[in-house]
Image (cartoon, rainbow, N blue to C red):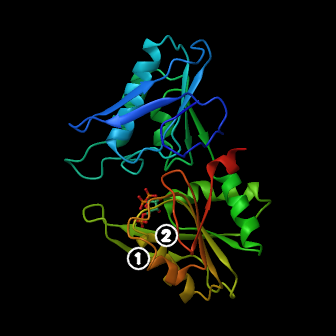
Amino acid sequence: MLNLNQGFTPLGENNQIEYKSFLFAGGEPHIKISNNFDANIPITITQRINSFNDLGMICITVDALKRMGVKQIDLFIPYFPAARQDRVMISGEPLSVKVYADIINAMGFESVTVFDPHSEVTPALLNNCITISNHEFIKQVIAKIGNEVQLISPDGGALKKIYKVSEFLGGAEVVECSKSRDVKTGKLSGFKVYADDLNRSDCLIVDDICDGGGTFIGLAEELNNKNAGKLYLAISHGIFSKGFDELSKYFEQIFTTDSIKEVEHAGVTQIKLQNILS
Ligand SMILES: O=P(O)(O)OC[C@H]1O[C@H](OP(=O)(O)OP(=O)(O)O)[C@H](O)[C@@H]1O
């Protein structure tokens, strides 16, 4: 096991390969891997990708391992970078998810494991892709909430997955919702909750990514208009680029994993991937 992100050990702490990594003064990542391991044994690289350099670190690590004689390398990257840029919305934009997938495919991994990918595009583009669903994560979230909740599917993307979550949980009730995003400006509008009266029932919004949080604030207001009880939010990949001041006004508790980063906030419960996967 070679864990490239310090302190992030999603597959456990056993059999870790030692290395030193740093950035050269010019900004390029570098690694020196110690050679006290058996190169005949398959190696799994784990990494949290938050920048292009984090992907670059994977590339140079694979090169170094191959030069050391390692034949089989597996990759574990829970958050797939640029996963939302999985379609060209307006001319002049890239299909970023394919750019990343092409780079990763070129390294010839035995398998590439991702957690709760944004859409079917990522697994379709990645060779030897293994996906881990959010089912166990949501099960653990509901166990922590401790009450019965209605599952809330925020938009079209989430709707494709929510009924499988409900089935996994033994048939939890689902409320469908929708929103509109202006693809030119990113602005959100038109939040709709397809229920007449939620009768003060507690609601758990389930989605893959929270970026600025606009989706969930807009939806929370609409859920409150429909007489919702307590609101909870479960997000597989927490970017939280606008912090928690606004989100915390609406949500009793926010749940996320450590697929992107560590989060320290009273209103956030982080469930480690290591505990979800074990
Ligand atoms: O925190 P926010 O800034 O509101 O962003 C989060 C939302 O963005 C993504 O969906 P997106 O809006 O890209 O729609 P899609 O599921 O139709 O691709 C994601 O699945 C969330 O729903």
Amino acid type assigned to the residue bearing label 2 in the image: Ser
Residue sitting nearer the eye, 151 or 8: 8
Residue 161 x, y percent position in the rendering: 60, 54
What is the number of the mark on residue 245? none
Tell me the quadrant of ligand 1: bottom left
Identify the image quadrant of the C terminus. top right
Is residue 211 found left or right of 123 in the rendered image? Answer: left
Disc 2 from disc 1: Cα separation: 8 Å
Residue sitting nearer the eye, 202 or 225: 202
Q: Circles 2 and 1: CB distance less than 8 Å?
A: yes
Residue sitting nearer the eye, 106 or 61: 61
Q: Residues within 10 Å of mark 2 (few under 14, many from 20)?
A: some
| Residue 164 appears in the figure | no
Residue 20 x, y percent position in the rendering: 43, 32
Is residue 216 found left or right of 132 in the rendered image? Answer: left
Residue 163 x, y percent position in the rendering: 67, 58
From the image, tell me which residue sits under label 2: 178
Q: Is 73 drawn above or below residue 207 in the view shown?
A: above
Identify the image quadrant of the N terminus. top right
Is residue 93 found left or right of 178 in the rendered image? Answer: left
Sequence-wise, the earlier of marks 2 and 1 is 2
Mark 2 element type: strand
What is the number of the mark on residue 190? 1
Q: Is 132 drawn above or below residue 201 in the view shown?
A: above
Amino acid type assigned to the residue bearing label 1 in the image: Gly
